[in-house]
Amino acid sequence: MAGELNNSQNWSLAYQEYKEAVQATPLGGYYPLPAFEVPITFSSKILIAKTVSTIPAGKQWKWAGNLRASQAFPNAGVNGQKSEIATFSLFLNRSKLLILPTFASNYELVLSDAYWLRNLQLTIYEFTGQITDNLTELVESVKDDVLRVESKIDAL
């Protein structure tokens, strides 16, 4: 799987948006930066989120906000409200590998909470390679190892 993640051909740009806070006063006050409501429904369990921002002189801002993944679950046969399935804390001018829960399907993303930022660009890359689950192979391997250890203990 790690080799698959390192292959650039297995990643595609899914979303990119830049937002800039509106200046509220001539003295430098700004309206809060609005949330990034990503208009895409994702199904991939692996994403990369990248943030880019210009930090004003004298500021030591490091945090870009919380990226929340939410999914609508059916409620008695009727579409219910969206439920949050994962939250990722993102830092400014960094990329983060996001691994969503295995039950996640058709989820949406919203980045918010860092209202003081003057500007922010959010970029989402989606993993398009094949995701393999080695769990079954690992369990079989451990089973064989346990049997071998048991036979050695019995021989003592």
Image (tube, rainbow, N blue to C red):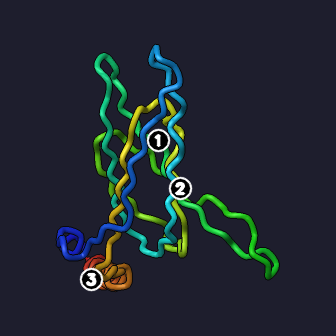
Question: Which residue occupies the foreground of this view, 43 or 102?
Answer: 43
Q: Look at the numbered discs 1 and 3 and tell me whether their residues touch, using CB distance below 8 Å.
A: no
Find the distance from the CA under tag 1 to the CA under tag 3: 50 Å
Asked if residue 46 lies left or right of residue 68, the reply is left
129 horizontally vs 33: left or right: left
Residue 97 against residue 92 in the figure, above or below: below
Q: Nearer the viewer, mark 3 or mark 2?
A: 2
Kindly identify which residue carries mark 1. 65
Q: Amino acid at mark 1?
A: Gly
Q: Earlier in the sequence, mark 3 or mark 2?
A: 2
Q: Can residue 140 be seen in the rendering of this structure?
A: yes
Determine whether 137 is above or below 87 in the image.
below
When asked about the image quadrant of residue 28, the answer is: top left
Badge 3 is on which residue?
A: 148
Q: CA distance from mark 3 to mark 2?
A: 54 Å
Residue at far right of view: 76
- Residue marked by disc 2: 37
Q: Position of residue 55 (x, y in %)?
A: 31, 29
Q: Amino acid at mark 3?
A: Arg
Dot 1 or dot 2: first in sequence order is: 2
Q: Is residue 131 above or below residue 88?
A: below
Left or right of residue 92: residue 30: right
Give the structural element (helix, strand or loop) at label 1.
Answer: strand
